[in-house]
Amino acid sequence: MNNNQNTDFLHSSTFKGVVAVLGTLLAVVIVIMIAAKVLFISDDSDSIKKTGRITSTEAKVVATTTTPRTTKKPVKKTSRDYKDYDEPEYDIDTDEYKIQTVISAVYLHPKPTSSSENLCVLPVGAECKVFANENGWLYLEYDGQKGYAYYTFFTQ
C-alpha cells in the first residue's frame, strides 16, 4: 500500500462511518456512566460504612462514609412530660380488660413512650390483657408484667 492509498482510505466513507459509530458508542457509554453515578452512588458523609472498595493497587478495605436510608414516619410530638410519669391506678384484678394478640414483636415499656426503657419483648402470638388505650399506647399485662406497647402491633 503506498502513501496515496492510505490518504484515500482516510478520506473514504467507510473510514468516516466507522469513526462516527465509535464516537457515538463512546458518547452513549459516557452518558450511561454519568446517569449511573447520579442514580446509584451517594456522596453522603454522616456515618461510616465499610464498602470493600479498593482505592489503590494494594488490596485493603477502605472505610467510606454513607448515610443509612430510613423511611420512618415523623414522630408526633406531645406536650406531656414523661420524666415524672406515675403509673396509672388500674386495678388489674377488678378492671375490665380485653384480650389482644401480638401480630408483630414489640417492646413493653414502663411509660407510654418509646424513649423509655424496654422491659421485655412481646413475641408474635402472645395474648395480653389490655386495660386501657392512652393516645395509642396500650396499658397491658403480659406474663405478670405491666407496661405499655403501641397499638399497631396488636389485633384490632
Image (spheres, helix red, strand yellow):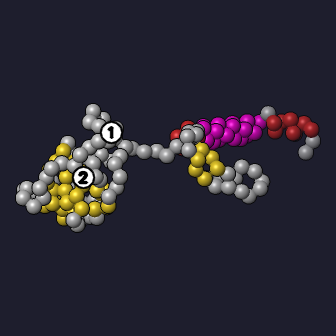
Q: Can residue 17 be seen from the camera position used here?
A: no
Q: Mark 1 points at which residue?
A: 75
Give the percent coordinates (x, y) of residue 96: 7, 56
Above or below for 90 versus 13: below
Give the percent coordinates (x, y) of residue 80: 26, 36
The answer to which image quadrant residue 123 occupies is bottom left
Q: Is residue 93 magenta?
A: no
Residue at far right of view: 2
Label located before the other in sequence (2 or 1): 1
Residue type at the position of mark 2: Tyr
- Residue in the foreground of this view, choosing between 70 and 139: 139
Above or below for 110 versus 3: below
The answer to which image quadrant residue 13 occupies is top right
- Answer few, some or many: residues within 10 Å of disc 2's Cα (few below 14, many 20 plus, some between 14 and 19): many
CA distance separating discs 2 and 1: 17 Å
Q: Is residue 153 left or right of residue 68?
A: left
Q: Is residue 34 magenta?
A: yes
Q: Which residue is drawn at 34% across and 55% down?
A: 118
Q: What stretch is highlighted in magenta?
A: 12-35
Q: Residue 139 carries which label?
A: none
Q: Can residue 29 be seen from the camera position used here?
A: yes
- Answer few, some or many: residues within 10 Å of disc 1's Cα (few below 14, many 20 plus, some between 14 and 19): few
Q: Residue at x 23, y 46 (%)?
A: 86
The answer to which image quadrant residue 38 occupies is top right
Q: In this view, does 136 lie to the left or right of 72?
A: left
| Mark 1, secondary structure of its residue | loop
| Mark 2, secondary structure of its residue | strand
- Residue in the foreground of this view, choosing between 145 and 27: 145
Q: Name the residue under label 2.
A: 148
